Image (cartoon, rainbow, N blue to C red):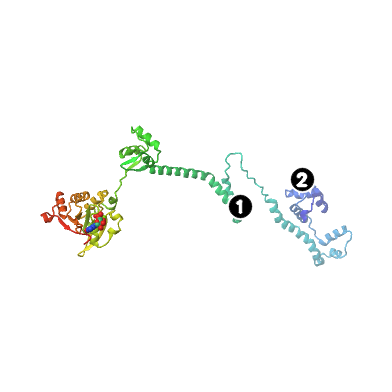
Amino acid sequence: MSNMVKYRVHEVAKDFDRTSKQISEILGEFGMAPKNNQKVLEERELDIIFAALTQRNQVEDLGAAVAATRKEAPAPEAPAAPAEEKPAAAAPAAAPVDAPAAAPAAETPAPAAAPAPEKQPKAHVPRQQPQKRVVDTRVSNVDLRKYDERIDELVPERAFNANSKEKIKKQNQNDRRQAPGTKRRNAEAEKLARLRQQEAAKKAVLKVSIPDEITVAELASRLKKTGAEIVKKLVRNGIMASLGDTIDFDTASLIAMEYDAKIEKEIHLTIEERLIDVAEDAPEQLEPRAPVVVVMGHVDHGKTSILDAIKKTQVAAGEAGGITQHIGAYRVEWEGKPITFLDTPGHEAFTAMRARGASITDIAILVVAADDGIMPQTVEAINHAKAAKMPIIVAVNKMDKPEANPDRVMQQLTEHEILPEEWGGDTIVCKVSAHTG
Ligand code: GDP
Ligand code: MG
């Protein structure tokens, strides 16, 4: 294009048959005076020169002008001549000539107008200078965070749609978040865990149950301390005790208190204490119950056998060695009403059981073997029954045996302040046999 051609001031002057000075003056009028003749003229400058020269050199007779030009040209053409002489008639003839003549004139502003908008923005829009973002790495804390929103601004949205970049961004965020935050959180979590442990440890020591008597070793283990520690503590308190020694509740609690332990008294319940709830029931909770009859007496005098006879079962046959090990309770229907019978062990080791059996029942049946008479557990049973202030029915058993001596039994009973009805007393004495019924 025209802008590719370097059109200098002196070249323009030569082409228009003017001096360089004249061309410079034209431009000077428009405030664009070239520095020298070598100045390469821009499109705009050329437009001005062309326009100015065209304006200032209007020709009256175009044909003459063209002819004048032709004269200069090496081969003058004939058709131009008539037009020269008859300007009026030449008009139509001149028209085609006018067109090319006008064309450059029309063209002159045209290139000025056309390339101008093309060129001007190019010339005027300042080139965007690549701005350098400098992260100052000389400082110890490089805060990259403040560039993050810039990333959001600068990176086109679709870039974030690409998974990898999204990931990278997220990763960066995570890294940033974890770096200082996690440390603090970890420290907090550790602290919390430690506190919990301490609390748990406290709680573990808090409660210690101590029975009436406890060995030093057992106390140590319950306090979660070493035996040596406890022995030392005891010595400091003026108690010389070794690991195997037994100390009483008070001494043990003294030591436990030194460890800020909460002391509970450990109570060992006997079997019947666990079996039988001694707590008072509220009156509304009370229900009429079947009368309870307890069967007591010396071992092997036939208590279980009598109960067997009553309920017509064969419990005695199934018992270990024929000895009642625990209290057996049986419910028997008697004239449409239930009666509960308790079988108690006659063995000397079960005093507490007999005592319980006596204290919770309504009637005690004292079984005495007619051939054996009153024996130590018989006496004990009598005492339990009396302590519970309950009526006693004496069953003199094994009457089927030839050596049975019920009178001797009754004699012995009176010695224990039990007077049979037969003898004017208030105690019913039945002479029975479990075997014969
Ligand atoms: P418990 O320990 O008081 O319960 O006595 P048992 O009921 O276990 O009886 C002890 C033993 O005496 C068993 O071998 C029975 O067979 C026996 N015996 C129980 N009652 C009678 C009885 O009326 N006559 C005879 N001859 N033996 C009996
Ligand atoms: Mg028995």
Percent x, y of residue 116: 71, 55
**Residues at marks 2 and 1, CA–CA distance in whole angstroms:** 47 Å
Asked where in the image residue 320 lies, by quadrant, the reply is: bottom left
* Residue 159 against residue 36 in the figure, above or below: below
Q: Is residue 292 left or right of residue 223?
A: left
Mark 2: which amino acid?
Answer: Lys
- Relative depth, front residue between 409 and 100: 409
- Relative depth, front residue between 374 and 270: 374
In this figure, which residue is indicated by the disc labeled 2?
A: 35
Please report whichever mark, 2 or 1, sits nearer to the chain's N-terminal start: 2
Asked where in the image residue 100 lies, by quadrant, the reply is: bottom right
* Ligand 1 quarter of the rendering: bottom left
Label 1 crowd bin: few (<14), some (14–19), many (20+), radius 10 Å: few
Percent x, y of residue 12: 80, 52
Q: Is residue 189 left or right of residue 406?
A: right
Percent x, y of residue 267: 30, 45
- Relative depth, front residue between 283 and 404: 404
Label 2 crowd bin: few (<14), some (14–19), many (20+), radius 10 Å: few
Mark 1: which amino acid?
Answer: Val
Q: Quadrant of the C terminus?
A: bottom left
User: Can residue 179 be seen from the camera position used here?
Assistant: yes
In this figure, which residue is indicated by the disc labeled 1?
A: 155
- Residue at the (41%, 44%) spot, across then down: 200
Q: Quadrant of the N terminus?
A: bottom right
